[in-house]
Image: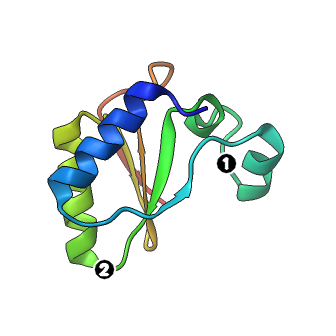
């Protein structure tokens, strides 16, 4: 149930990064989102968001660079994952940390 354009962008980002992507979270129901600690208006609820597992600084850089090149406009950075989305219902061109 992911948004088709998001899947295309994700595949493009993976290709640009040149490394495998491990998706740890994508579309969520409200209960799972709540259990994961997601925001009540999370882009995961509408199929616009994915979290990608990351191992180290170099991988983090490659994923962020590729995500920007692929068109993702919202990026959250954590120690163990990168959140990617471009939900039209949220602020654009933003990054944040967890």
Residues at marks 1 and 2, CA–CA distance in whole angstroms: 24 Å
| Image mark for residue 4 | none
Tell me residue 42's x, y (percent). 61, 37
**Secondary-structure class at tag 1:** loop
Residue 94 visible somewhere in the drawing: no
Tell me residue 18's x, y (percent). 18, 62
- Name the foreground residue: 24 vs 4: 4
Tell me residue 78's x, y (percent). 44, 65
Left or right, residue 57 beside residue 30: left
| Image mark for residue 38 | 1
Tell me residue 63's x, y (percent). 26, 58
> How was this image coloured?
rainbow
Q: Look at the numbered discs 1 and 2 and tell me whether their residues touch, using CB distance below 8 Å.
A: no
- Name the foreground residue: 1 vs 91: 1
Q: Residues within 10 Å of mark 1 (few under 14, many from 20)?
A: some
The residue drawn where x is 44% and y is 19% is 88
The residue drawn where x is 46% and y is 73% is 80
Left or right, residue 84 beside residue 57: right
| Image mark for residue 56 | 2
Up-down relation of residue 22 to residue 34 (above or below): below
Q: Residue furthest right?
A: 31
The residue drawn where x is 76% and y is 39% is 29
Please identify the quarter of the rendering in which residue 1 is found.
Answer: top right
Please identify the quarter of the rendering in which residue 85 is found.
Answer: top left
Please identify the quarter of the rendering in which residue 31 is found.
Answer: top right
- Name the foreground residue: 91 vs 32: 32
**Secondary-structure class at tag 2:** loop
Give the mark nearer the N terminus: 1 vs 2: 1
């Amino acid at each position: 149930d992911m948004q088709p354009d998001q899947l295309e962008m994700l595949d493009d980002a993976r290709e640009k990064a040149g490394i495998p992507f491990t998706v740890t979270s994508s579309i969520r129901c409200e209960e799972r989102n709540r259990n994961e600690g997601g925001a009540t208006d999370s882009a995961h609820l509408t199929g616009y968001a994915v979290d990608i597992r990351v191992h180290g600084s170099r991988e983090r850089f490659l994923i962020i660079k590729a995500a920007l090149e692929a068109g993702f406009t919202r990026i959250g950075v954590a120690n163990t994952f990168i959140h990617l989305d471009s939900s039209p219902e949220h602020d654009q061109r933003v990054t944040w940390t967890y």
